[in-house]
Image (spheres, helix red, strand yellow):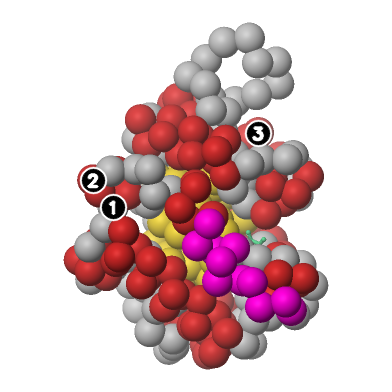
């Protein structure tokens, strides 16, 4: 059985006090949710990681939103995977489309970040997804395939089996335009097929593939009902504890 995960990505939102407050609400609600079978993760800005990992305990796990590709050194302003691990994080987002778009992160760089994250025992949540143009001109399968091949498929099978993949169509991020459950399922099934051809059916079956992009309490039910969707990566709705909790509950309904 592959792991079901609902992860929030706070992006560059919530100052220290606001982060503690929203996170504490989430922890209390997750504790009260009797039917929870999924892992709940919050990927927060760096300033929050140390405090949240202590507050979250086993109830809500913590992830960073990025790490540097080197172990340490003269990289002013950067944060290493080892530092992230040292404050109790278990996860790190790698290759979010905003990193690809605004920070020019290439597949080759993301492959290096993935290796260093794994070496430091962090679980990479590796993000892939096509732009609106790529969706409209029908090249989205090629785009996804190339992101997988160049970002992830140089890993050996043992390393790959630790990866979580997140499919986030860029046109659905923060736009209110969600992929329909059919569109999302189609791409998730394609990703699983690519993994199975590269590695094995067993590894593909065990890989959690999350959907992200304007996921909200209203559409979560239908998305999570798809057989290849193993959870969500939630942006805006993870900033409001009630909405985030309703998305988590959609899993158990
Ligand atoms: P929204 O849920 O705000 O569309 O963001 C999705 C996302 O980018 C999560 O990583």
Q: Earlier in the sequence, mark 2 or mark 3?
A: 3
Residue 106: x percent and y percent? Answer: 63, 42
Please name the residue shown 29% across and 66% down the image: 196
Could you give the CA–CA distance between mark 2 and mark 1, rounded to whole angstroms? 5 Å
Q: Tell me the residue that label 3 is attached to.
A: 47
Could you give the CA–CA distance between mark 3 and mark 1, rounded to whole angstroms? 30 Å
Q: Tell me the residue that label 2 is attached to.
A: 158
Please name the residue shown 36% across and 72% down the image: 193
Q: Is residue 245 above or below residue 95?
A: below
Name the element at disc 2.
helix
Q: Tell me the residue that label 1 is attached to.
A: 161
Q: Which mark is residue 88?
A: none
Q: Nearer the viewer, residue 116 or 120?
A: 116
User: What residue range appears in magenta?
Assistant: 136-146
Q: Is residue 16 magenta?
A: no
Q: Nearer the viewer, residue 121 or 209?
A: 209
């Amino acid at each position: 059985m592959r792991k079901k995960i609902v992860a929030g990505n706070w992006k560059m939102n919530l100052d220290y006090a606001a982060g503690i407050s929203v996170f504490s609400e989430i922890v209390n609600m997750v504790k009260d949710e009797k039917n929870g079978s999924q892992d709940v993760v919050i990927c927060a800005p760096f300033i929050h990681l140390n405090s949240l990992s202590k507050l979250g305990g086993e109830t809500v796990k913590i992830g960073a939103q990025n790490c540097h590709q080197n172990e340490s050194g003269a990289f002013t302003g950067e944060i290493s995977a080892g530092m992230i691990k040292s404050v109790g994080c278990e996860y790190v987002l790698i290759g979010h489309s905003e990193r690809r778009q605004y920070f020019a992160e290439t597949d080759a760089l993301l492959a290096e970040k993935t290796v260093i994250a794994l070496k430091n025992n962090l679980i990479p949540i590796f993000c892939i997804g096509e732009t609106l143009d790529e969706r409209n001109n029908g090249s989205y399968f090629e785009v996804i395939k190339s992101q997988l091949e160049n970002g992830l498929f140089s890993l050996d099978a043992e390393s790959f089996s630790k990866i979580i993949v997140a499919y986030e169509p860029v046109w659905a991020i923060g736009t209110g335009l969600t992929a329909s459950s059919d569109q999302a399922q189609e791409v998730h099934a394609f990703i699983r097929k690519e993994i199975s051809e590269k590695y094995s059916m067993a590894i593909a079956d065990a890989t959690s593939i999350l959907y992200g992009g304007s996921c909200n309490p209203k559409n979560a039910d239908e998305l999570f009902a798809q057989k290849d969707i193993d959870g969500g990566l939630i942006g805006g709705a993870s900033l409001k504890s009630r909405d985030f909790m309703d998305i988590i509950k959609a899993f158990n309904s």
